[in-house]
Image (cartoon, rainbow, N blue to C red):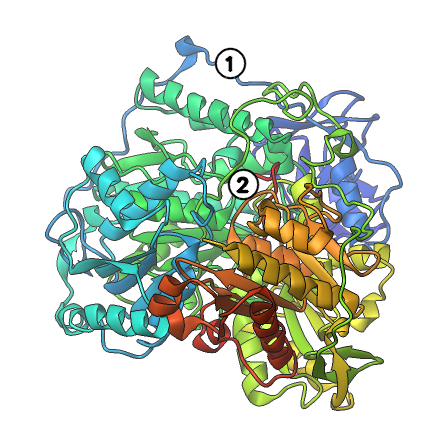
Amino acid sequence: MVRFEQIGVRPEPGDNVAIASRRLEAGTELELDGTTITLPHTVLEGHRFVVTPIPTGAALTSWNTPFARASRDLEPGDYVCTPTSLAAVTARGVEGLPTEPSATNEPLDPYELDENALHFGQQVAGVEQPGTFLGYPREQGPAGTRNHVVLMATSSRSSGFVTELARRFDGAAAGDGVVPVAHTEGGEDEVPNNLHFLLATLAGFTLNPNVGAVLIVDTDGDVVSGRAIQDFMAEHDYPSITVPHAFFTRSAGFEHDLTTAGALVEPWLPIVDAQQREEVPLADLRIALQCGGSDAFSGISANPLAGQVSAELIRHGGTAVLAETDELIGAEPYVLNNVRDLATAKRFLSVIKSFKERVGWHGHTAEGNPSGGNVYRGLYNIVLKSIGAARKLPREVRLDHVIEYGEPLPGTGYVFMDSPGNDLESVAGQIGSGCNLIFFTTGNGSITNFPFVPTLKFVTTSARFERLHAEMDVDAGKYLTGTPMAELTAETFQLTVRVASGERTAGERAGHSQVSIWRNWKQVGPREGISIATDGRMSRRLTDLPAEDRDAPLDGQPLPGLTSDTRTAARLLGVDGRQVPEAVGLILPTSLCSGQIALRLAAQAEVEKWAGDAVTRMVALPHTEGCGSSGGASEETFARIMLGYLLHPNTRMALLLEHGCEKTHNDYFRSRLVEAGADPARFGWASIQADGGLEAVGGRVKDWFSSFDLKTPVEQRGNLGALTVGLEARGRLSNQTAEALGLVGREIVGSGGSVVLSSRGALLQHDGFRTAAFGSAAEVGPTIAHGQRFEAPGWHVMRMPGTDWMETATGFGASGVQQILAHVAGGTLSAQRFVPVVEFSNDPETVATYGDDLDAVATGDAADQARTGIDTIAAVASRQLVPKAVASGNVGFQITRGLLGTSM
């Protein structure tokens, strides 16, 4: 027998369901309001159960807000589960569950503003003696909480460059350090639809108070360039950058440009390092309020605590910035409970409407926001998630301003910024707006950090805090066990002041961070048969959508093409009954939040040889997907790409590393592997959250790779017919070089191998190449979807939704490509982390300018150039040549969202 007070929490008096504060097994006897009831089913921690009778069709309420409707008459003790929540929990293998859901999700009807019901209140009263912290004063604007030298890429094309440049300044005396801002955006040839958001965010980064000096790096021909940022700042009346800064355009070889850029940065280091903290007003603090990996207790402990600390900061003249638009849909009445004026209320609702429309253009609704981890931890739907998220805004605090993504803060007080629910993308906008400290609330234990703004992590329960104590900062769960909220608020406020003054957070001690800016979207308006109106109409099944729009798999049969009888030898490796150019040990993060940890573990595994001599190298593939993005077509493409690398012929050992609260967790990929006919037992599985944090998960990963006694790969004589090669051309392409690439493909296919081309690439646009490869200049269409593995060897064309180089290379790799041969003109390319990229050129200007980055220079007629390409492929496949972009560290990995993916 247990008492309700020991195991249950009602968010507010009057609610007819309660939250289980620990797992309750079926058959548990519970004393509730003087009556003993027996639970008929298992109720997981954070999930809800009925506490007062609810008739069929009546509303189930939390915070006195309807979130679901009873599917039948419900009695006290009944487990509350909707179709989506029951499916999510069942997929995790939980026993003791009901066979049918007990409730259905509350429909998300559009909120209608009642102007007469609005309350135009006052902001919380200020304190008589505002406080101070030790910060870095700036010539203009608020003081910084940190003092970093920032190396910022304007687009994804320069991300590998700034990452490598920052690495070369590791340990340098430069204030709080030299950090890169590398991201995935702006790398396509066309103007992106997110251009305004991207420019606003990058401009805001340069002016953020935590930036002591900044180098802005672009690549010649970038749509999103340093010049574009300067023009944007002038057009929108941004102040000038007053810290040491420079704009740098890459114009020569990678190593040459690193040296040149490094010479620009070097003089700034002692300037930044000499700056001292001074006493500055707490009014200079701008707090970014975020939540990630939320659970049922987020709205009870962590979010209210973050809100109360923010209210205290506002009393001292500071600012708090709420975001994540789609995670407030359904909570509009709560947010507008106390608002500055009618215009602010209307602007908030217009932001909600705009967000819903943009998502709807891509065939999605806000109901798709909660991640698998959210649902598993008790947030059944967007209404529950939104009401809990809104608790970061205390009822007594007034909403003062509503701004666009990355827009400079218009004043102090409480601000809402438009953004997706994707944590990293939302944070980037807040930093672009000027925030200099982050409050990140989490139920599951999210570990993400930003490079130059410290993150304080609030975890919802004490049990989770103890499990992940090295990664968390604030145990908000103490409120659930009796600590008064006022006491927790005072403690956390003092911690906030100390961190603002230089005390390092758990994330800073861990030393990992990443940046993701609101990713581009492809649709710019409603389309018949695809879009969903904001009222939910026009909803269609995925299989009803046009095949190209949803990137549906194709038959995978090769095109009829030309071949040759020439054979080129290569020294390949005999691995598990097949010949391959290398044997890779792969650590594959299941979502964006475990990417940086996977990267660190792979580097450690490489140095310490965790897999012994069974693999030739260790690789991790950090990316931006798996959580915080729409499902449907883009999720199918994402899953296909991930499986492509797990089942790639070069992959000998592979472990999946989950964060723990994502949509695409380990169990998700176990199911996907089974569907693909693969045995999940072949792979390793680790979880940052479930295994107990970074140190524990690192040990688990090491133990798995070290547990095998595999034979060392043996070198064998073979030829290029054992390979799948991607052919690509970027920039100017002569007729002879186009023909040469066709001849390269003919030999590979004639030898029994395969060639993969991009449907959007320059080669298929060239009559000379098509004639050399297929015997005529007639156009050819795709044989495989993006990242799809083909059914038979030969000539293949992969469907590409865009022109981004790294997304193209990532799709190639997932399709089984083992090496990419790219002709470049006017510049060179970044390498891909998994697939070697071989770059050659016949263009004299390119050879003169970028010769140091080329793996080969092609001269002579088409046959001579083809021989150069073939010999270089053979040298790399035989491990006699390491492509220069790989050797220099200019590498990346990026997954497309296709035509229908969007941030949520």
**Please, what is the three-letter code of the amino acid marked with disc 2?**
Ser
Where residue 700 sits, quadrant-wise, is: bottom right
User: Horizontally, is 245 left or right of 451 in the view?
Assistant: left
* Closer to the camera in the image, 456 or 7: 456
Q: Residue at x 45, y 50 (%)?
A: 187
- Residue 246 visible within the image: yes
Name which residue lies at 30% across and 69% down: 257
| Quarter occupied by the C terminus | top right
Q: Which mark is nearer the camera, 2 or 1?
A: 2
Looking at the image, the residue that sits furthest to the front is 861
Return the residue at label 1.
112
Residue 590 horizontal/vertical position (percent): 64, 59
> Residue 81, can we see it?
no
With 237 as the anchor, is 619 left or right in this view? right
Report the disc number at residue 878: none
Disc 2: which residue? 903
Distance Cα–Cα, label 2 vs label 1: 25 Å
